[in-house]
Amino acid sequence: MSSLKVGIAFFYHESHTFSPSLTGIEDFKKEGFHIGEDIIGAYEGTKTEVGGFIDILRREDVSIIPLVCAAAIPSGQVTKEAYETIKKEMLAAIERADECDGLLLALHGAMVVDGLSDPETEMLKEIRAVIGNDLPIATTLDMHANLSSEMISYTPLHFGFKTYPHVDMYEQGVNAAETMVHLLKTGENYTASFVKMPVLLPSINMRTAEGPMHNLVESAKQKEKDPAITAASVFGGFPYSDIPEQGVSILVAGTDSQKTEAVARQLADEVWAAKEKFLVRLPTVEEGLKEALAYKGSKPIVLADISDNPLSGGTGDTTELLRKMIELDLPNSLFGALDDEETLKVCREAGEGAEVKLQLGGKASPEFGAPVPVRAEVVRVSEGTFRNKGPMNTGMLVNTNGAAHIRVNKLDILITGRALSANDPEIFRHIGIEPTDKDILGMKVKNHFRSSFENLVGKVVYVDAPGLASNDLTVFDFKHIPAPVWPLDKSIPFDYELTNS
């Protein structure tokens, strides 16, 4: 039996600094906050980074030291109290653990804490202060990470997601764990090259099934075929964070510093050449509805309310698309999920079959649309728990904090007790709604939902309703991002900073 011991941990949040709501410790507890052995029960058998860590360490007969796992749904910046609480638990767990030979950390890369723009790098710094400089660390990072060059000073081994929707989280966990085991058994040395670019990209056209990000990722994969290149990652950034670390990054890890630098420079050239292709114009709500009404396909058409996508930090309760769908009284249509605890409470108290007067949505962000007054039938209520069955986060337990299926005239609406993107059909099916039976689906989503819905729907139309996650980056009052930055200033010359570890 191997005598190797590896600690595993997870600290994950994508922070929208323009959101009025802060993300506190209770938000992490709602999504997932596990310490010690509870981590194994929560993540074993799931298609997540931590699930990948567990599977590889077990396969290689390496002892697993579960530390701390904490995640919250994308939202406003994390409170200092929540960050310090989780970080303190993390550092204490590392200190309590028997001597670890290495650490595997699943991070996001776009977390922002009140008063701290780069908390994940800060945490790596503090972990190094506990474990010293020799113990190897490997991380996984989200494709939408906003990174600084300082991160590679604490470890060269970073593995970015290569899919959007993110269906390779498990695979990147596997890659990180396999590299860690190889390093521990062979002592091989790794280096990293990092490029920061003055480019701010909207994420709507970062899908990796097609388009400019597909081409960049495929190029990175080709470069990883060189045995000296362990991981080549293109990070598109999370554009809704007003921080100095904002922007596109390239991070290449490997065993040959000359090759990692060359690959990083090549990928930077390719990003700059492709940048214009990331900019797209979206139809208005009225244009999207007109297209939906004219659609004659056999499968549902989706109107994606991308500006209020909760996984981009949207509040999940804006009302422009909802209001128009109610006004049109669209037959055989579904809207969801709408985050509205007040409405959920009324529905629960009234009970199934009751008729209720409601003020739908518009409570967390009324500047993007007032509540919609309606009379509705309460069709069904539920506790709102289900497990994902699609390819993204497969097997993960999801808790909507309660749910209600209501009907306003001909329109079915799913109400939830917290903001969640409808990325898995189970969010509807768990309460008895079959989305494939509908003609029109109004959904608060962006791209992740495609992993499960791509084969279930006939067409997707992204609509440009107002919201915190607008595709138009010029509507945000950036004060702290690097300047100048493309496309806010399209006259800037091609330039970037390169750092080697």
Image (cartoon, grey):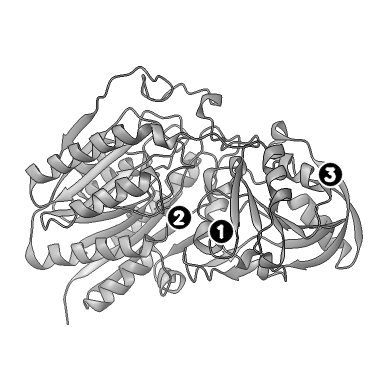
**Real-space CA distance between mark 1 and mark 2, rounded to the nearest whole angstrom:** 10 Å
Q: Specify the amino acid type for callout 1.
A: Asn
Q: Which residue is mark 3?
A: 327
| Residue 112 image offset from top left, x and y in percent | 44, 38
Mark 1 surroundings: few (<14), some (14-19) or many (≥20) residues within 10 A? many
Which residue is at 14% across, 45% downward? 260
Up the image or down, 431 lies above or below 270; here it is below
Mark 1 or mark 2: which comes first in sequence?
A: 2
Q: What percent of the width, then of the height, locates residue 303?
A: 65, 49
One can see residue 171 in this view: yes
Q: Nearer the viewer, residue 111 or 335?
A: 335
Tell me the tag on residue 165: 2
Q: Which mark is residue 423?
A: 1
Going from the N terminus, do you reach mark 2 or mark 3 first? 2
Q: Quarter-wise, where is residue 29 in the image?
A: bottom right
The spot of residue 148 in percent (x, y) is 29, 36
Number of dots carrying numbers: 3
